Image (cartoon, rainbow, N blue to C red):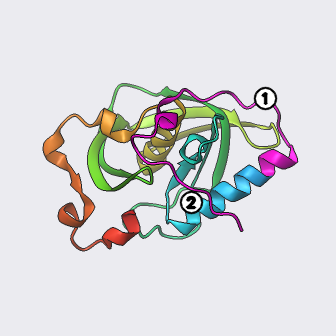
Amino acid sequence: MTIREILKMGDPRLLRVAQPVAAFDTDALHLLVRDMFETMQAVNGAGLAAPQIGVDQQLVIFGTDVVNPRYPDAPLVPRTVLLNPVVTPIGDEEEEGWEGCLSVPGLRGVVPRFANIRYTGFDPYGDAIDRTVSGFHARVVQHEVDHLLGKLYPMRVRDFSRFGFTEVLFPGLDAVQDD
């Protein structure tokens, strides 16, 4: 089991635009995906983008089969590996929701996201993925794909009166889960 170091906000590698994945179904790619899931699970993440572990590729993972302690009220999102994603909003409707990030530990903020999206891309074998989703699933995808564009969720916060430390904003939530 390999748990990778997660880069923290302030590291310039998190601000780069990631490069497309060029080779599918390779041992190196499958190993990277395995390491990413092990890393995400070790810290109870809802998702993880390759740039968060210093890998400059358009690769995100998200989803789980069990309730996430960092987002206990959120619905389950299917485990997904998504390479070279493209997100297309369906309509202009936005929803605000609280977000946290493994690269911004201990903080949460309200972020507007498109309520309904279509995302396309590829799985690790090069097979096409094409899904239309809404709600928390759409939020997670947009958050992770932002990492591939060099964006962290605080860059999308519009009202900083709704941004702060998890332990203050959510006293019932174990703040250690956010580190």
* Residue 72 lies in quadrant: bottom left
What residue appears at the point 33 percent right and 31 percent down from the top-left corner?
A: 93
Residue wearing tag 1: 22
Instruction: Give the alpha-carbon distance from disc 1 to disc 2, as whole Å.
Output: 24 Å
Left or right relative to 23: residue 101: left
Q: How crowded is mark 1: few (under 14 residues within 10 Å), some or many (20 or more)?
A: few
Farthest left residue? 161
Q: Reply above or below: 55 against 72.
A: above
**SS assignment for the magenta stretch, majority:** loop
Q: Residue 34, percent across and down? A: 72, 58
Q: Residue 166, percent across and down? A: 26, 61
Q: What residue type is labelled 2?
A: Met
Q: Residue 29, percent across and down? A: 78, 45
Which quadrant is home to the N terminus? bottom right
Q: What element carries label 1?
A: loop
What residue appears at the point 49 percent right and 59 percent down from the top-left corner?
A: 45
Q: Reply above or below: 119 against 39.
A: above
Farthest front residue? 11
Q: What element carries label 2?
A: helix
Farthest right residue? 26
Left or right relative to 2: residue 148: left
Residue wearing tag 2: 40
Q: Which mark is residue 122?
A: none
Please tell me which of labels 1 and 2 falls first in the chain. Answer: 1
Q: Residues within 10 Å of mark 2 (few under 14, many from 20)?
A: many
Bounds of the magenta segment: 1-30
* Residue 11 lies in quadrant: top left
Q: Which amino acid does label 1 sit on?
A: Ala
